Amino acid sequence: MKNMNSQQALERLKEGNGRFVEGKTTARNFATERSALLTGQKPFVAMVSCADSRVSPEHVFDVGLGQLFSVRNAGNVVTDIDMGTLEYGVAHLGIPLLVVMGHQKCGAVTAAYDGHNEGHITAIVKDIHPAVQAVKKGGDKAQEVEATIAANVKRVIADLRKKSVIIAQAEKAGRLKIVGMKYSLETGKAEMLE
């Protein structure tokens, strides 16, 4: 795959999502794709997204093997290990675009909103809690949860910039663009967050 800049990578994601929304995704020959990747990988985007089974980034953006460098876990939070994964993608694979994508009706964000406390789920809730605090005002729960999903994406992006020298330097040097998105379960559309 040819090298892309961040704007080209973003346009490619948008085009792929458009095909997904329209139900006109690309037919893929995974055997051929596997063979082409034997000598290495050159993904064009690093993706942080939720582990929700309804939100598969490869499908949402209509991409094949070797094109996304993905980190997925409940609530699209970023642990130290996830941070190292993203740093590797940026520093060693030369990925020009990092996307943090939340999604409509996120169960992890809802659990954080509700103050859920059980087992290791507590670690996820704790990570999302600052976004809940920024949004929760005692209004309509469904609206506040949706607003918290967007706030959580923005919080994750801020943490990436603050906690990773590698990511911050790549962005400052213009080698990396970081964007936030929110995926709609209803429409299939992944929209940019301001």
Image: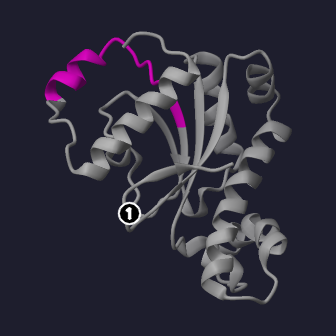
Q: Answer whether residue 40 is magenta in the image.
A: yes
Q: Residue at x 18, y 31 (%)?
A: 30
Which corner quadrant of the image does residue 91 belong to?
Answer: top right
Tell me the residue that label 1 is attached to: 53
Determine whether the residue tagged by mark 1 lies in a helix, strand or loop. loop
Relative image position of residue 141 (x, y in whole percent)? 65, 87
Relative image position of residue 172 (x, y in whole percent)? 80, 21
Q: Is residue 95 visible?
A: no
Relative image position of residue 14 (x, y in whole percent)? 43, 37
Of the pair 116 and 187, the residue shown nearer to us: 187
Instruction: In the rendered view, tell whether residue 91 sits above or below residue 70.
Output: above
Whether residue 154 sits left or right of residue 98 in the image: it is right
Total label count? 1
Q: Residue at x 49, y 21 (%)?
A: 8
Q: Answer whether residue 53 is magenta in the image.
A: no
Which corner quadrant of the image does residue 118 belong to?
Answer: bottom right
Looking at numbered disc 1 in the image, what kind of residue is underneath it?
Ser
Residue range highlighted in magenta? 31-46
How crowded is the residue under tag 1: few (<14 C-alpha within 10 Å), some, or many (20+)?
few
Instruction: In the rendered view, tell whether residue 117 sits above or below residue 28.
Output: below
Of the pair 126 and 170, the residue shown nearer to us: 170
Q: Residue at x 83, y 69 (%)?
A: 134
